[in-house]
Amino acid sequence: NLIFSIITPLGWLQRCPTYKEQISELKEKDLSTHGFLGYPVLQAADILLYKAERVPVGEDQLPHLELTRELVRRFHYLFGKNIFPEPEALLTKSSKLLGLDGRKMSKSYSNSIALADKSDVIKEKVRGMFTDPQRIKRQDPGRPEVCNVYKYYELFSPDKVADIGRECREAKIGCVRDKERLAELLINYLKPFQKKREAIDFDVSYLKKLLKEGAKKAKQVAQKTISEVREAIGL
């Protein structure tokens, strides 16, 4: 991270869309810090330390991945030795899902549903989701194409999304009931993850063993990469 920070122009970091967005959105926090501005460089270090060729990301992280590729090219140009691959994005079929309030999903905005959230928490969060702002009364026809709740149905219930959209447009279902159905859908979707998590959490020795084995494998790869980097820059 330090080595990459030394060769990263400030302009590359200041033009990052995520940096600009959070500066605008989180005005109550002091984000004028080296750590916040340089966070994409730390991400790049995490990726390149293990010479990753494909990185699973959402669409909002694509600029960060492009910065990583730029850093690879700059490092190779400055030190005359090719060490790192230029990682490509590994996008899922649904590579972008907005937060509950229609903004980017982020812990900083408190607009996400955690995998470990209990049923009552999920219901409460979904109840507050943004819907069609022009649908004031229950009998008003809705516009699913502008409704964030509908976007979640597209991902989590693709076989029923056409019917849900029709019911919304014809005002056969209200937003309150629509959110109740979505909450139940998410609760059922997360149950297998939560059940497995509970089983793993119960076995602390298994978790410690897993972490220890993973750290050992990662350290071996990291040490080799660091040795190559030190040799390239003359340390």
Image (cartoon, rainbow, N blue to C red):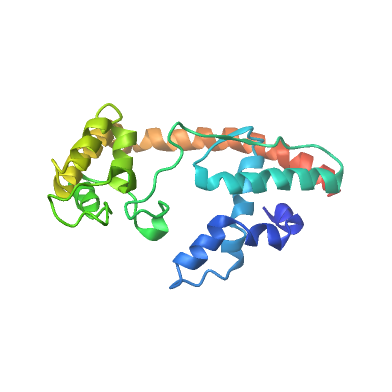
Residue depicted at x 23% and y 55%: 128
Q: Nearer the viewer, residue 93 or 132?
A: 132
Q: Nearer the viewer, residue 176 or 122?
A: 176
Q: Is residue 99 left or right of residue 162?
A: right
Q: Position of residue 80 (x, y in %)?
A: 87, 42
Please say whether residue 101 is visible from this viewpoint: yes
Q: Does residue 4 lie above or below 11 as drawn?
A: above
Which of the 4 image quarters holds residue 107? bottom left
Q: Is residue 6 left or right of residue 78?
A: left
Q: Position of residue 186 (x, y in %)?
A: 25, 38
Q: Does residue 15 lie above or below 153 as drawn?
A: below
Q: Position of residue 137 (x, y in %)?
A: 14, 55
Which of the 4 image quarters holds residue 201? top left
Q: Residue furthest top?
A: 159
Please say whether residue 115 is visible from this viewpoint: no
Residue depicted at x 69% and y 39%: 223
